Image: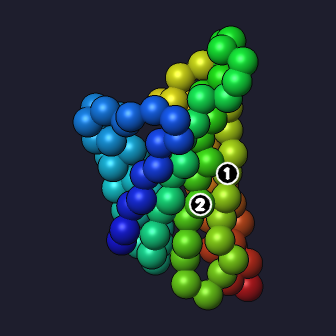
């Protein structure tokens, strides 16, 4: 499984990279078919609260890419919300394939 992290207009620190890798590993344990996980982080203008955006794209073979776009006060919160949405979408895809 490959994890790609892109920070737009800022430098990502090691703590945030470790957080993303930890969360991605947990997701892969539940859904081992995941091929790639792409995270795009950016600060939405203007500088106010709720201005951290995380776009998460998960690629799984034989199904369309699963995407979540969440905005929150912190990147960690936006990533958590995005991964929750991804999990729900992957569960739905899993149920469809089981039928």
Circle number at residue 68:
1
In this image, 74 relative to 88: left or right? left
Q: Is residue 8 above or below residue 64?
A: above
Q: Is residue 91 above or below residue 51?
A: below
Residue that carries the numbered disc 2 in the rendered image? 57
* Quadrant placement of the N terminus: bottom left
Q: Is residue 72 visible?
A: no
Q: Is residue 69 visible?
A: yes
Q: Is residue 46 above or below residue 79?
A: above
Disc 1 from disc 2: Cα separation: 7 Å
Crowding around mark 1 (Cα neighbors within 10 Å: few <14, some 14 to 19, many 20+) is many
In this image, 63 relative to 21: left or right? right
In this image, 45 relative to 14: left or right? right
Give the secondary structure at mark 1.
strand
**Mark closer to the chain start, 1 or 2:** 2
Point out residue 86 in the picture as x, y percentages from the top left corner. 62, 55
Point out residue 95 in the picture as x, y percentages from the top left corner. 69, 73
Q: Who is closer to the viewer here, 29 or 61? A: 61
Crowding around mark 2 (Cα neighbors within 10 Å: few <14, some 14 to 19, many 20+) is many
The image quarter containing residue 71 is top right
Give the secondary structure at mark 2.
strand
In this image, 18 relative to 8: left or right? left
Q: Residue at x 62, y 48 (%)?
A: 55
């Amino acid at each position: 499984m490959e994890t790609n992290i892109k920070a737009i207009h800022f430098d990502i620190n090691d703590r945030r990279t470790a957080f993303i890798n930890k969360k991605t590993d947990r997701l892969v344990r539940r859904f081992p078919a995941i091929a790639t996980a792409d995270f795009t982080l950016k600060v939405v203008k203007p500088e106010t609260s709720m201005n951290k955006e995380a776009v998460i794209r998960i690629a799984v073979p034989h199904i369309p890419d699963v995407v979540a776009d969440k905005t929150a006060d912190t990147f960690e919160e936006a990533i958590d919300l995005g991964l929750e949405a991804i999990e729900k979408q992957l569960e739905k895809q899993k149920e469809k394939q089981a039928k």
